[in-house]
Amino acid sequence: MQTRRFGRTGHMSTIVIFGAFAVGQLNQREADETMELILAHGVNHIDVAPSYHEAELRLGPWLERHRDDFFVGCKTQLRDRREAREELHRSLERLRIDTFDLFQFHAVTTMDELEQCFAPGGSLEAIVDARREGLTRYIGITSHGMEAPAVLMEALDRFDMDSILFPVNGRMWADGEYRRQAEALLQKAAEKDVGSMAIKAVARGPWDGRPQRYHTWYEPLEDPQAVERALRFTLSQPVTGAISAGDARLLPAILDAAERFRPMETAEQAEFVGVAEQYGQIF
């Protein structure tokens, strides 16, 4: 699988980054099988969070044995300094590791939430303390929804982040304003040498009342050709990599598509955005 430089961290991350939500609702045997698949495809970057059910506990035995094989990013959705610090230490314990490579503010979806992180006594203080104490090497931020590019742009203006994570897919690119802001954000990230991760690459849209057949927050594309085309689109943008979907059953198609990755030409991207616009409600 191809790798790309994860910004100023210098880590050469695989273009698919393992989204550990996929093992959060599995038993240990099923999680072990999933991690064997990840290793077999050479994936070397993991994204996990304490809110991903039991994902930290499922990864713990693997990271205890394979810590040097993975760049490990974790995160907190708590905004208070004390609570964020306690959760960070709890995640280290559950993952059976001594330090994170990356620790992130998680799901900062509005300017108000960003203010909470940066306020006196906010989670920024806890994460900066953790870096000073050697508990994390780098600091990043993640966001979701239509405000994500604007929120992350403001975050980059206010703090020297090492990474960003937000939605990059054809359906959202069909919204002109979102695309304009997202492309400006990716340009700024490149100028600042900030690593960039994409989520929802293989999303079709919200479940919108349909039976939820997967553990993902969104209805995913399932057909291998559709998965490959969607992943090609996302990876043809200037991102480091795409986070894999949060259901282990989707991983084989995603990993196989990543190993065949070739960039989309501009005309093909435009055609794909037109197709993705027909998926329905934006998310």
Image (tube, rainbow, N blue to C red):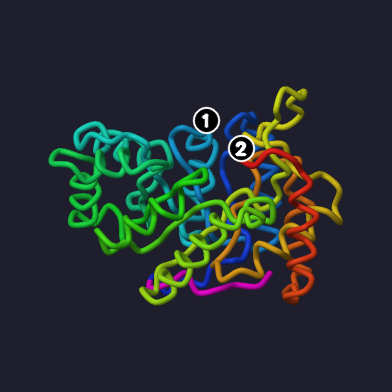
Left or right of 23, for residue 142: left
Of the image marks 1 and 2, the number of the one nearer the N terminus: 2
Please tell me whether residue 167 belongs to the stretch shown in magenta: no
Q: Amino acid at mark 1?
A: Glu
Q: Is residue 108 above or below residue 78?
A: below
Q: Secondary structure at mark 1?
A: loop
- Magenta highlight range: 1-8
Q: Kindly identify which residue carries mark 2.
A: 23
Q: Which mark is residue 183?
A: none
Measured as percent of width and height from the top left, residue 29 is found at 67, 34
- Which of the 4 image quarters holds residue 213? top right
Please tell me whether residue 7 belongs to the stretch shown in magenta: yes
Left or right of 114, for residue 174: right
Q: How many marks?
A: 2
Q: Kindly identify which residue carries mark 1.
A: 54
Q: Secondary structure at mark 2?
A: helix
Residue under the point 39% across and 77% down:
191
